[in-house]
Amino acid sequence: MKLFITLFIIVGALVLIVIILPQLTSKETCTHEETVQKFAKGKFVTVDGKKVHYVEAGDGPPIILIHGFLYHAVMWKKNIDALAGKFKVYAIDLWGWGYSERLGEKEYGFERYGKQIVGFMDALNIKKAALAGQSMGGGISVYVAAHYPEKVDRLILVAPAVIPYPMTTIGKIYQSPFIGEFMNAIPGDALMKNNIRTVWFYDKTKATEEYCKEVLQPHCIKGSYAGMMFILRNVLKEPYVEKEADLLSKMNIPTLIIHGREDLAIPLDRSKRLNELWKGSKLVIFDRAGHSPHEEYPEKFNKLAVEFLS
């Protein structure tokens, strides 16, 4: 009898979700074109037939900044000007994020993103560049360096998604079939904002309402959430780019690894292991910092990055 009741509740909940879900999915209210016209502040280039949005600044040796999951080029807002004093900075929006074009939900992956970065470089005639990537962007940077070493001068990896790590509790909830879609469909951005404040930042007050709004603004573009869920469930799963990490251990690409001691998304010990694997790498730990140490302590990060790249 208890089993029957449990099954009845589960089936009832699923039916309820299926019925209610279509009524709730109202967040994706914008087309790519209208959102770009209203909010995009950078430039566009076409790569493999798809538009790529990027912010460009400065002059000098090139560095490409690659954001992580959930974000876009805005995550480097406090770093671009400082780096642009000595370098040509390109802060890119990966496909599916920010103001770059959306792909079919099953088209996302490290390989596709790696080709996006290389295609971006070719389109702008960038022969070789330093890559700086945060979280998923760090994994993409590693993929590019391993498969296209002639394209990469140096690496800056911020809390990189390279060595497998346990998914956070909220991440596991979002990965669950139906439940993830249901949570995404709940009106408003309160859940996402709370996630940003509690996971990406140690000091929650730094993730202001204005900041969160700017991060989440492009999520209104149709196709954003389907791509996000596919990446969360299929791309950000083991073994990530461990194979590429092994390849890079045999190469000689100078690498700076930066990690927040209080990072709740990717444990610090993953970057420690990566540092041990790559004998030529340097690990710098930011105390009282979460998953985005370059945003929490921009002056410290900018100084380290400029010194490392110079």
Image (cartoon, rainbow, N blue to C red):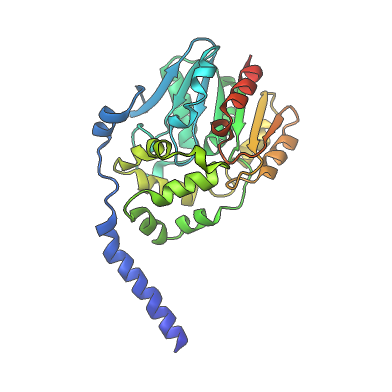
Q: In the picture provided, is 192 more to the left or to the right than 292? A: left
Q: Residue furthest front?
A: 205
Q: In which quarter of the image is residue 301?
A: top right
Q: Quadrant of residue 220?
A: top left
Q: Can residue 83 be seen in this view?
A: yes
The correct choice, above or below, for 217 with respect to 148 in the image is below
Frontmost residue, 284 versus 213: 213
The residue that appears at 26% across and 51% down in the rendered structure is 26
The correct choice, above or below, for 142 with respect to 129 in the image is below
Instruction: Count up the numbered dots.
Output: 0
Q: Which residue lies furthest to the top in this view?
A: 60
- In the rendering, at what x and y percent does residue 249 appear? 70, 32
The residue that appears at 57% across and 47% down in the rendered structure is 265
Q: Can residue 103 be seen in this view?
A: no
- In the rendering, at what x and y percent does residue 169 appear? 54, 57
The correct choice, above or below, for 22 with respect to 70 in the image is below
Q: Quadrant of residue 1?
A: bottom left
The residue that appears at 37% across and 53% down in the rendered structure is 184
- In the rendering, at what x and y percent does residue 47 appear? 38, 26
- In the rendering, at what x and y percent does residue 25 appear? 28, 53
Q: In the picture provided, is 51 more to the left or to the right than 62? A: left
Q: In the picture provided, is 58 more to the left or to the right than 261? A: left
The residue that appears at 36% across and 47% down in the rendered structure is 225
Q: In which quarter of the image is the C terminus?
A: top right
Frontmost residue, 7 versus 55: 55
